[in-house]
Amino acid sequence: MFELGPIFRALLRQKVGAILIALQIALTLSIMVNAIFMMQQRSSQMARPSGLDEANLFYLSNTVFGQNYNHEAALADDLRLIRGIPGVVNATQINAIPLSGGGWSMGLQHKAGEGENSIGVAVYMVDDHGINTLGLELIAGENFQLTDIEWRPATSVSWPARAIVSQAMAESLYPGAYQSALGKTVYINQNEAVQISGIVKTLQAPWNGWDGVERSMLVPFQMETRNSRYIIRTEPGRRDELMPIIEKALAESDKNRIIRNVTSLEDTREDSYRSHNALNKILLLVIVILTLITAFGIVGLAMFSINRRRRQIGTRRALGATQLQVMRYFMLENFLISTLGVVIGAIAAVGLNIWLVSKFELAPLEPQLLVVGVLALYLVGQLAVFYPARKAAAISPATATRSV
Amino acid sequence: MLLMKQLGKVFHTGEVSTHALREVDLEVQEGDFVSVTGPSGSGKTTFLNIAGLLEVASSGLFLLDGENVNQQSDSQRSKMRNQKIGFIFQSFNLIPELNLFDNVDVPLRYRGFDAKERKRRIEQQLELVGLASRMKHLPSQLSGGQQQRVAIARALATSPRFLLADEPTGNLDSQMAQSVMALLEDINRQGTTIIMVTHDHGLAQRAKRQILIKDGRVSELTATLHEPLHIVSPSATEHSAKVAGV
């Protein structure tokens, strides 16, 4: 009924062009599917929540150059000043900014001692205002008390007795039962005991490419440092307005330091994922170009084939083919070529993915993406051949009796 | 069966209009074998194309089995071609990529016959033209005469009542031409109406009726065995009398 047999047999006798297009479809499918997969992975990485109230957060650097500087008093003054500005929700000193690319990491282990397995964790040093400032959701335990906050001299290597960890970190320490982490003692720096006093739902590490990006901990420290950062949370919609105000207020309140690098968390996120965005755009461009080349290839082959077969098409029309049947012939022919292409392409896509997985530690390809890719290529093929098929259908049956 | 009245066909190329057929009056009865002759460019192919529903007349009336084909859609004309008309072309017009079986199968698929019926008809027709043993061969593996026999098998496969042949022996040597002509005569004897365009006056005279097309006008050269004698324009009648030597 649908002439699949004769079309297939005819293709076997004119196979060079068809095979070339099929290979082009195969190449497009294998690259397209893997490129989309890589894009998806990057997009899902970018879509991960940091756990912070990003829209209303900004931070700044406070670089002290004055001699005999009282860091502890200056920090207390600065935080009091910032928190007192109308529109500010809260503020805290912090040693590292999530997603910024720079920070501290340590290892937590169940047992003290050298050689014990430890799990890497990003460390944020904050005071009792830290959770509220960052906008974190405490899902178990309690926040730090004022009495928990320790002053950490610049030369100190010790760690406080309490810590709040992210749910992912708790899960890593106690797989399948993250709640049981609460109240447990773990060891940092091999031998220093730390009790887990709270669990926050999400808090990402500063490094978005780290496979432990969801593992982090808060420790109750205020630091003595000549280069500290303050992170500030504002009321919704007031961040941009308050950024210069707070910068100016701090700068004017103490002439022994420089306030700089006033940056919103949203800008930090954008910077953090700039390469992801760029790569996604490049991959998208590659997909579009490849798809267009394939589509034009199909159009070119179909037009060539139709021009070569004008008399044959006229003969078919003379023998009773309707315009629709002529169109259907070419669309079915393309369907068969596409089928060869997508079969080879699907095998190549899986092969390419296996290679990418082994070389670059990517996740394996999702089968449904392959199915979507196959359907997309079929659609591209049918859309590309539609115009030539219409041209073929428009060939007059009288062509059968006239010189072409 | 076929009735043309005051039929005309004009081709327009830019501002130039070419009258390919003028005021054609013709009636063809069931079972006729009509040969059409005429000089090159006289309008023979245009006449055949219109008779075979491959082109639409610019003016006049054309009834095929009582149906006014000028008023039919392209799709309706396609179906009518498939159901009622078989074509034989000078260049055979076989599809080179398909073997003989698939070539004869082409119009049968458009008719919508099931696979079993198609196979029966294909084998029957190829048997009729003596090529049943070569149904898996490609057209390029056959001689010209054999290819034309396949084309005849293809034309007859749908059991048309009306066979149109455009120079069916034009690309054949005389022996092959005689053989194909004999086959056409045999087909006509079995009741199929045939209109055959030819340059070969010898073959044309073997038809029951002969018409001449010159300058787009049709004239009857012989009276058919069937009455009545068909209407032709006065100038054509005069011309036909001269050509026929009567």
Image: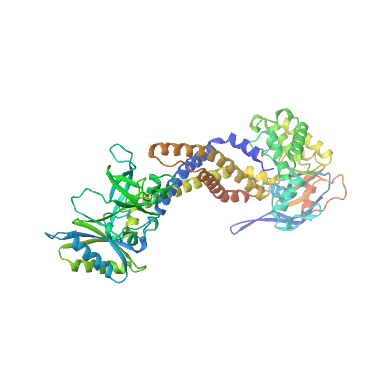
Q: Residue at x 88, y 48 (%)?
A: B227
Colouring chosen for the image of the structure = rainbow
In the rendered image of this protein, does residue B236 appear above or below residue A7?
below
Instruction: Give the image quarter of residue A268.
Output: bottom left
Instruction: Please identify the quadrant where the C terminus of chain A is shown.
Output: top right
In the figure, is residue B140 to the left or right of B128? left
Farthest-out residue, left: A67
Residue A143: where, in percent of width, then height? 34, 58
In the rendered image of this protein, does residue A144 appear above or below residue B34?
below
Farthest-out residue, top: B133
In the figure, is residue A389 to the left or right of B42? left
Of residues B135 and A99, the one nearer the viewer is A99
In the rendered image of this protein, does residue B178 appear above or below residue B215?
above
Q: Is residue B216 visible?
A: no
Residue A257: where, in percent of width, then height? 17, 62
In the figure, is residue A278 to the left or right of A220? right
Of residues A109 and A27, the one nearer the viewer is A109
Residue A299: where, in percent of width, then height? 53, 47
In the rendered image of this protein, does residue B129 appear above or below residue A122?
above
Q: Residue at x 63, y 49 (%)?
A: A393
Instruction: Give the image quarter of residue B151.
Output: top right
Residue A366: where, in percent of width, then height? 49, 43
Q: Is residue A397 visible?
A: yes
